[in-house]
Image: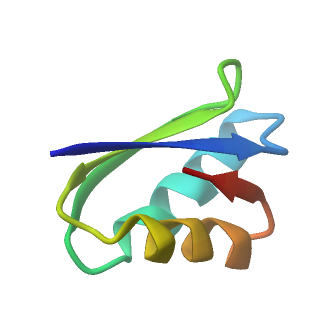
Amino acid sequence: MAIELEVEGMTCQGCEEVVEKALEMADGAEEASADRYESVAEIEGDADPETLVSKVEMAGYEAST
């Protein structure tokens, strides 16, 4: 199952990598990809969306489902 989040504040490839790593630490997340140009992140797996939002926010970015 794919989950898509809106992520604000990513400005470079390093930001994308930080968001991806934060998301992949969530239980149930198998793989994550972030796109700074579209301001989105897509997560494969069965992770809880609210947990994913929390992980992104703890990494310093704004996120919503």
Q: Position of residue 39 (x, y in %)?
A: 68, 30
Q: Is residue 37 above or below residue 28?
A: above
**What is the quadrant of residue 45 in the picture?**
bottom left
Residue at 48% over, 53% down: 20
Q: Is residue 64 above or below residue 42?
A: below
Is residue 65 toward the left or the right of residue 4 in the image? right
Count of picture labels = 0
> Quadrant location of the N terminus?
top left
Q: Residue furthest top?
A: 37
Is residue 43 toward the left or the right of residue 33 in the image? left
Residue at 71% over, 47% down: 15
Q: Position of residue 57 (x, y in %)?
A: 71, 71
**What is the quadrant of residue 7 in the picture?**
top right
Q: Position of residue 26 (x, y in %)?
A: 36, 77
Q: Position of residue 19 (x, y in %)?
A: 59, 56
Q: Nearer the viewer, residue 23 or 64?
A: 64
**What is the quadrant of residue 47 in the picture?**
bottom left
Is residue 58 toward the left or the right of residue 27 in the image? right
Residue at 70% over, 79% down: 58
**Visual colour scheme:** rainbow
Residue at 45% over, 64% down: 23
Q: Is residue 39 above or below residue 8?
A: above
